[in-house]
Image: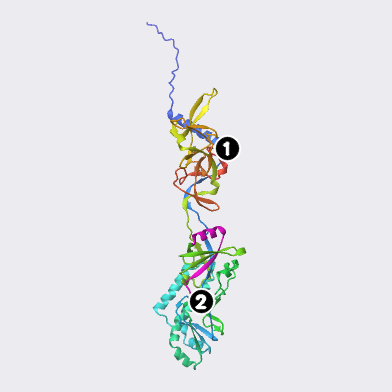
Amino acid sequence: MPQDNRNGKIKTYRRPLNVNLGMLVFGVIFVYIAICVLMYLLNDKHIEWYTVQNGSLSQDNVYTGLALREEVVVDSTYSGYVNYYAREGERLGSGQLVCTVDESGQLREILSEQDADNTALSENDLLELQLEISNFCASFSPSEFSSVYDFKYDMEGTVLKLANVNVLANLSAINEATNGQSVGLCRTAQAGIVVYSVDGYEGVSPADITSADLNREGYQKEQLIANDLVASGDPIYKLSTSENWSVLIAVDKTTAAELEEAEVVKVRFLKNQYESWANVTILDKGEDGLFAKLDFTNSMITFVTDRYLDIELLTDTENGLKVPLSAITNKEFFLVPKDFVTKGGNSGDYGVLRQTAGENGELTTEFIATQIYEETEDDYYLDNYMLRVGDHLIRPDSDEEYTISRSASLMGVFNINKGYAEFKEVEILQQNEEYAIIRSNTVYGLSVYDHIVLDAQTVDVNEMVFE
């Protein structure tokens, strides 16, 4: 029989090494993340960042102003009960009837007997009342509840004026009924807008106004009410006789300088959102500060019953990229002629050719990549991260040399989109105490949604940033 040559020894089969590429990539990523987390935990300097947005500055341009007009207070030459026939805020011509003064008191009794207050109103009369109510509802503010009382007097005056029209038409018959007792007719001596209140500011000039006058607290006015008993010499109405009027506001030095330079400004009246242009005059009141006198040539009739007005100055506002002032800083950069800046290296970055001397005195030229931060007609702004004062630069394709010596400052912020602090120049268009509006779409500047360091003093150029 053939002999079995196998010795019975069993050898283990070694499988060939099979590298799983997916596991390898996952391992590299895991190690990278672990290192980043470890560096973050060990680093006690964590940077706060801010996302750049488009926007504009909200400036507080709202003021409370004192309105001054050409006003004439008319006093009664009779004693008795006054009845009005013109609605407050109505424009009257010269010689038109405003009110009557019943010296005997019998007219008041006759009006009561005739129930004049319940006189039927026409459709036009009702529309007039509806317009009055709608205007009040649109402009009412709970913070100025006193306007409710003004509205009440306005409505009473309107109703009485409409109801008294029938009485006025029968005035001759009423005179007969009162046995010829005097009923004084009060007619306008000049054209104007009639107002049934007085407050002591009639005839006051802007030169007489102080800072205390601009405070509406404590302001009082006397409302002239129909059917009240008046004495000879008491005020019974006043006329605003000119469409030219002024509003005085207190301003700071900066606003005063801007308004004085502009000479005119657009104003929004917050009562009804009406807008109008005003000529500006700055008044220096010494210890009382600076006042701006805003002169208008229209819309006086709209605000004829208001002594104090809340207004907003509609000054020009710049739109751009909105960044906090804390993110803005200044950095020094080298000025290098454009002819000495070229593209080179494997990445095609901008840079310069720097000449250095070796240990044996042999001159060598090396390409130094550097970033451009701004440019003028002749120079580029280059960072001083790799360059030093006194470095010798060689002009490409020439033996001409330039020694770095000049520098200039740029205003900018630190962009951290790439994980390190990259300086970006900014141009401020407008600013307030917290934010600045900077020009957008610049070659070396920021773009919307960029991440920037909130406090520029916490980092330096090219510093790694851990958010």
Disc 2 packing (10 Å; few <14; some 14–19; many ≥20):
some
Quadrant assignment, res 222: bottom right
Q: Residue furthest front?
A: 400
Residue 399 percent across, percent down from the top left:
46, 30
Q: Relative to 184, does residue 449 appear above or below in the rendering?
A: above
User: Is residue 89 something one can see in this rendering?
Assistant: yes
Disc 1 packing (10 Å; few <14; some 14–19; many ≥20):
few
- In the foreground, 192 or 31: 192
Q: Which mark is residue 86?
A: none
Q: Which mark is residue 153?
A: 2
Three-letter amino acid code at the position of disc 2:
Tyr
- In the foreground, 141 or 310: 310
Say which residue appears at 47% left-offset and 93% top-offset.
176
Q: Relative to 390, does residue 360 appear above or below in the rendering?
A: above
Q: Which mark is residue 43?
A: 1
Say which residue appears at 46% left-offset and 32% top-offset.
395
User: Is residue 274 something one can see in this rendering?
Assistant: no
Give SS at disc 2.
Answer: helix
Q: Relative to 108, does residue 391 appear above or below in the rendering?
A: above
Q: Are marks 2 and 1 in contact (CB under 8 Å)?
A: no
| Quadrant the N terminus occupies | top left
Magenta segment boundaries in residue numbering:
238-263
Residue 360 percent across, percent down from the top left:
54, 22
Q: Residue furthest top?
A: 1
Per the model, the C-alpha gap separating discs 2 and 1 is: 72 Å
Give SS at disc 1.
Answer: loop
Q: Residue furthest right?
A: 287
